[in-house]
Image: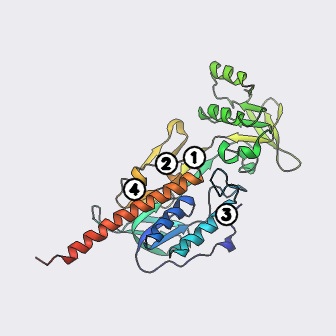
């Protein structure tokens, strides 16, 4: 369910510099902020209020929280971050850039919001998530998050035993079809003009997966507002209630060009992510990434865990920097 704008209580940006600014208020960003706030770090979360899973009615596959509405999870997360002194600020990041010269031992960053509010921080955690790119099939996008699904683990149980169609978007769609076949006896694979090897056709036939090679012209909406089926270019109507699509996924990079974070293209033109190493560390000193912005397949639980790990890593390195500074201050002047 989408977040209601009047339900989001936004904290004010602090005038003084903080230890960490977290860009992104999803599971990864909030869990990273939680770890930092519990370590008595001053932390600000910048949340645009536009989570990837906003169209979904419930989140699944996360122990204890399975079946909870995404908006409710995020609201509870904000409350928990605030409980330990963290701030959660509604806003769009217009720019983020280093505030100190490259090579500075204890770097600083300036984050500017679209309304020109600014905050400085010693470290940044980028947890902006990603955006999904659907194939350009008329009538498809209106059903995204409901009749059009992408993840068998997130939505599979809820669509079990229903007539499902897989719209091919690339080689990964073959594996996609096998996963959804586990959930229904009635599965149709629409090649959409993409090649399908004879061995794969034989494997599909063995699993009783119907293959339709005619190009898809449109997704047809039924009288109830849900998906009625798919119409192909030759006019054939194939009744389906659910469509599974492997989307192209792109890390959300808006406002972050000034950081110079390295990006990696995924194989087959399936998307792009922020490159990262241990605990989400990047090649830019002082900047970490976590969640779907760097792991495009991470579900909510994995994204939250990555945020927690990054937060702990940031805190550990800040502790070292604080000790180095204290030692330097304690030494007598030469």
Q: Which of pointers 1 and 3 lies earlier in the amino acid sequence?
A: 3
Instruction: Look at 55% across and 75% down and name the residue there.
Output: 83
Query: Quick check: marks 1 and 2 in contact, CB under 8 Å?
Result: yes
Q: Which of pointers 2 and 3 lies earlier in the amino acid sequence?
A: 3
Q: Which residue is mark 2?
A: 273
Percent x, y of residue 173:
63, 34
267 over 48 or under it: above or below: above
| Alpha carbon separation for disc pair 4 and 1 | 20 Å
Q: Which of pointers 2 and 4 lies earlier in the amino acid sequence?
A: 4
| Alpha carbon separation for disc pair 1 and 2 | 8 Å
Percent x, y of residue 183:
73, 37
Q: Out of 105 and 78, give the one closest to the viewer.
A: 78
Under circle 1, the secondary element is strand
Q: Which residue is mark 3?
A: 71
Q: Which residue is mark 4?
A: 260
Percent x, y of residue 52:
62, 56
Q: Residue furthest front?
A: 64
Q: Residue furthest left?
A: 334
The answer to which quarter of the image holds residue 240 is: top right
Under circle 4, the secondary element is loop
Crowding at label 2, few (<14), some or many (≥20) Cα neighbours within 10 Å? many
Q: Which of pointers 4 and 1 lies earlier in the amino acid sequence?
A: 1
Q: Residue furthest right?
A: 223
């Amino acid at each position: 369910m989408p977040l209601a704008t009047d339900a989001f209580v936004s904290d004010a940006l602090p005038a003084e510099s903080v230890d960490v600014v977290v860009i992104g208020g999803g599971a990864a960003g909030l869990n990273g902020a939680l770890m930092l706030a519990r370590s008595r770090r001053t932390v600000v979360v910048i949340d645009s209020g536009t989570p990837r899973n906003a169209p979904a009615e419930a989140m699944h596959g996360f122990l204890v929280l399975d079946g909870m509405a995404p908006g409710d999870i995020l609201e509870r997360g904000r409350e928990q971050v605030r409980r330990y002194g963290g701030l959660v600020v509604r806003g769009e990041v217009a720019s983020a850039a280093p505030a100190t010269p490259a090579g500075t031992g204890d770097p600083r960053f300036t984050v500017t919001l679209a309304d020109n509010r600014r905050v400085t921080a010693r470290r940044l955690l980028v947890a902006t998530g990603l955006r999904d790119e659907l194939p350009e099939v008329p009538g498809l996008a209106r059903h995204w998050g409901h009749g059009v699904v992408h993840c068998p683990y997130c939505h599979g149980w809820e669509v079990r035993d229903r007539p499902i169609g897989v719209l091919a978007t690339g080689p990964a769609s073959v594996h996609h079809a096998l996963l959804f076949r586990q959930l229904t006896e009635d599965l149709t694979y629409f090649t959409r003009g993409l090649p399908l090897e004879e061995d794969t056709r034989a494997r599909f036939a063995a699993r009783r997966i119907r293959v339709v090679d005619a190009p898809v012209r449109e997704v047809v909406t039924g009288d109830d507002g849900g998906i009625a089926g798919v119409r192909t270019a030759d006019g054939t109507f194939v009744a389906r209630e659910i469509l599974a699509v492997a989307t192209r996924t792109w890390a959300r990079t808006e406002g972050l060009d000034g950081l110079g974070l390295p990006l990696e293209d995924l194989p087959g033109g399936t998307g792009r992510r922020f490159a990262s190493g241990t605990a989400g560390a990047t090649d830019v000193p002082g900047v970490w990434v976590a969640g779907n912005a760097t792991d495009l397949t991470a579900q909510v639980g994995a994204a939250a865990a990555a945020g927690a790990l990054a937060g702990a890593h940031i805190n550990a390195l800040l502790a070292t920097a604080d000790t180095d500074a204290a030692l330097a201050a304690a030494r007598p002047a030469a």
